[in-house]
Amino acid sequence: MSKEGSFKKMQVLIIGAGFAGSVVARELAEAEHQILVVDRRNHIAGNACDVKDSHDILIHQYGPHIFHTNSERIFNYLSQFTEWRPYEHRVRGVVDGKEYPFPINRDTLNQLYDLDLDEQGAADFFEKVREPKAQVKSSEDVVLNSVGRDLYEKFFLNYTKKQWGLDPSELKAGVAARIPTRTNSDDRYFTDTYQAMPSDGYTAMFENILKHPNIQVQLATDYKDWLKQDRQYDHVVYTGCIDEFYDCRFGKLPYRSLRFEHQHLADTEHYQSVGTVNYPNDFDFTRITEFKHLTGQQHPVTSIVREYPTAEGEPYYPIPRDENEVLFKKYKALADEEKNVTFVGRLAEYRYYNMDQVVGAALNAVDKILEKK
Ligand code: FAD
Ligand code: UDP
């Protein structure tokens, strides 16, 4: 907070009503600044947006979003705006028509190779099959180094090619490193301390974050059209694609997109046994998610989504590889020169952030803005 007498109320424009934009908006509003949030979509919550479909099932419009974090600070922060429903996500991977626990654990090995390994046996198995790498640089290195070639080819190679349109050897280690390897029977997708879903959904949580007398929200508004009318702001917070902000002057920064195929199943109470089933080797889609597992909604019918990765379309993922990082750095150098513009979030920072990491980045961005002013 500024000292008595030196406080200047800022007019702040925030571009994007996702986690990054909404958290910054709330914190600056709490600090008594006047905020306008614009989003070119016709809804708040960014990619975390959820909505009831025409059959009254709560679905995630942009694919499955499961909240997980090890940060007490971030969990407590969001707890101001929502109650939670505990939820531990489980995923199966289909190989040769059979479902196996994924991430790979002891049970995956036992079921796949018809073995009866205990924890030590699983550790010995991985030790025997792994291809040790002196330097783990790519996603291929990560997986071969931990589980060896057969498991790599069964679970990772084709999924990764589908998801990114690239071979795992062309992607940075961090992508595949998101997936652990386990010698025990833990079949949860995440092992974070806090794993939960907002009780009334993400959109309801965002409504609470943005409900503040100092915040105005204007949807279906591209900021470039808005600024054409010669409006002035003391500070701008940008959460869209960083290359677009600079009219792609160094060339387009690649973002991976998805086409979401939503389906309602009128005669089915449960489509699959767990929240998400991955199809590494079959079909053009990567995975199927059944929302009722995630939301806990009780309903006699169900809705699912298939994710088809695409090169063109709405930007969803930065693509972590060295040449993209080089191009991003050129844009970042311009961004670093801006005195009155803050770039934050998954698209603006070109970082493969989870939701909790975006909240953390947004809270840090607020500290910097308030320090500077
Ligand atoms: P966004 O949510 O993308 O928000 C940016 C907003 O800016 C958008 O609404 C966009 O319309 C707006 N915008 C952009 N340009 C302009 C412009 N010119 N004018 C006006 N508005 C503009 N994270 C997890 O923690 N757990 C998960 O399970 C998980 N699953 C995911 C599944 C999928 C399929 C995807 C794609 C992501 C998933 N994530 C998950 C990541 C999560 O979605 C992001 O970390 C988070 O939503 C990013 O928030 P953000 O505010 O940075 O960006
Ligand atoms: N991955 C894979 N096989 C799978 C699941 C994941 O090869 O069955 C790889 C793939 O490269 C993917 C990455 O691990 O992009 C990260 O997976 P995650 O489920 O975290 O992706 P997200 O939910 O962010 O799309």
Image (spheres, helix red, strand yellow):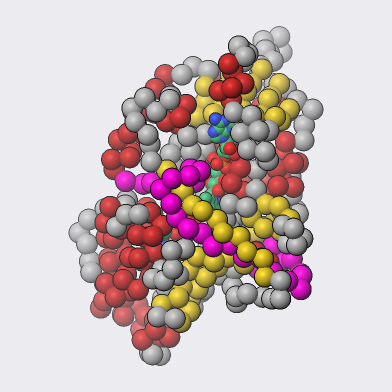
| Quadrant showing the N terminus | top right
Left or right: 281 in relation to 306: left
Toward the viewer: 353 or 282? 282
Quadrant field for ligand 2: bottom left
- Vertically, is 204 above or below 240? below
Left or right: 176 in relation to 200: left
| Residue 191 shows in this picture | no
- Percent across and percent down for residue 65 are 59, 55
Instruction: Say which quarter of the image contains residue 43.
Output: top right
| Residue 38 shows in this picture | yes
Left or right: 350 in relation to 212: left
Farthest left residue in view: 134
Residue lying at 38% horizontally and 36% vertically, measured from the top left = 253
Residue lying at 22% horizontally and 66% vertically, measured from the top left = 132
Residue lying at 71% horizontally and 30% vertically, measured from the top left = 217
- Percent across and percent down for residue 85 are 71, 61
Instruction: Say which quarter of the image contains residue 58.
Output: bottom right
- Percent across and percent down for residue 150 are 29, 75
Toward the viewer: 122 or 335? 335
Q: Which residues are magenta?
A: 293-321
Residue lying at 43% horizontally and 25% vertically, measured from the top left = 247
- Vertically, is 53 above or below 28? below
| Quadrant showing the C terminus | top right
- Percent across and percent down for residue 55 are 75, 62
Asked if the stretch drawn in magenta spans residue 315, the answer is: yes
- The number of discs equals 0
Left or right: 228 in relation to 177: right
Farthest top residue in view: 5
- Vertically, is 169 above or below 265? above
Instruction: Say which quarter of the image contains residue 38.
Output: top right
